[in-house]
Image (cartoon, coloured by chain):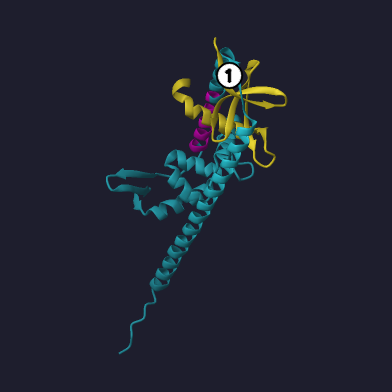
Amino acid sequence: MKEKKDYSGQTERNIEEEYDKKMKEIEMKIAKERRQKEKISQKEKNKKKKEILMRLKKIGLVSGGVVALGLSAFAGWSAHEAYEVSQGEKIILENFKFGGYVDRINRTYGFDYYIGKSDVSYEKFISYLKRAAEENGYNDVQSYIAFKERFDGHVADDVIERDISRKEIHKEAKKAYINGVVDTKEEGASYGK
Amino acid sequence: MENKKMEIITVSNIDYAILDEIDDILYTVNVNNGNDIKMFKVNEDTESIDGLDEDEQSVALVKFYEKHKDLIK
């Protein structure tokens, strides 16, 4: 008896999906190991810094008035800076065009993800956001800020797939706050003008 | 106001009292001028104390705000 052949391409798709899954697992393992190594080297660096600082520090008497003035100056300066960064993050999110209803709903068992009226998988949700970031002309940092603000850091991490430092976030947010626009990748297309 | 015993670092011949330390950043005030506040970090390569660039300052200030926001508000 002749064996029935499958010409739908389903087998190939299954193999591809399995391959992608395995690749992702390997990449995640490598990233985890790299993070662990970085953590150890950071710990060693911090220890060295503490030792240097111990050598450079001395003890002295300082006027209470000077201390109070210094602390209030830092309080004012830092509050102003935090305000600018948060406003910049808001501008970046507000100018991101999601292209329709894109959201997630917190259920008792976890999140459900929606694009338009369809309930989609987390993977589809992430790949939609990747495309949306590209279409908006947002760079990695701007996209990270928009998704972190709209959803959370995990979603933003999965879309961007690289570590974004606080320094990068603050720089981009402040730029948006100062300019009042998001400086997108497309030439001449700055959202928020 | 009473004088306080504090940790001090000397940078460019100026004494700065350390008001706070967050993630290796030193938040300091000039012991002779309460309006002169500066942030420094330890440079482990040169084993000295450096100032922060503009982006580092921004991050450091927001960290200061986050740590003390209950008092600042």
**According to the rendering, which colour does chain A have?**
cyan
A23 lies above or below A95: below
In front here: A105 or A64? A64
Identified at 55% across, 20% down, the residue is: A71
Identified at 50% across, 56% down, the residue is: A33
Identified at 60% across, 30% down, the residue is: A178
Left or right: residue A110 compared with residue B35: left
Q: Position of residue A6 (x, y in %)?
A: 37, 77
Which structural element holds mark 1?
helix
- Say which chain tag 1 marks: A
In front here: A46 or A12? A46
Q: Position of residue A153 (x, y in %)?
A: 45, 43
Residue A85 within the segment the image draws in magenta: yes
Q: Position of residue B48 (x, y in %)?
A: 68, 35
**According to the rendering, which colour does chain B have?**
yellow
Where does label 1 land, which residue?
A70
**Which image quarter: residue A139?**
top right
Q: Quadrant of the N terminus of chain A?
A: bottom left
Question: What segment carries the magenta color?
Answer: A79-94
In front here: A129 or A53? A53
Residue A160 within the segment the image draws in magenta: no
Looking at the rendered structure, the kind of residue marked 1 is Gly
Q: Is residue A18 visible?
A: yes
Q: Position of residue A64 (x, y in %)?
A: 56, 14
B69 lies above or below B3: below
Left or right: residue A179 compared with residue A89: right
Q: Is residue B73 visible?
A: no
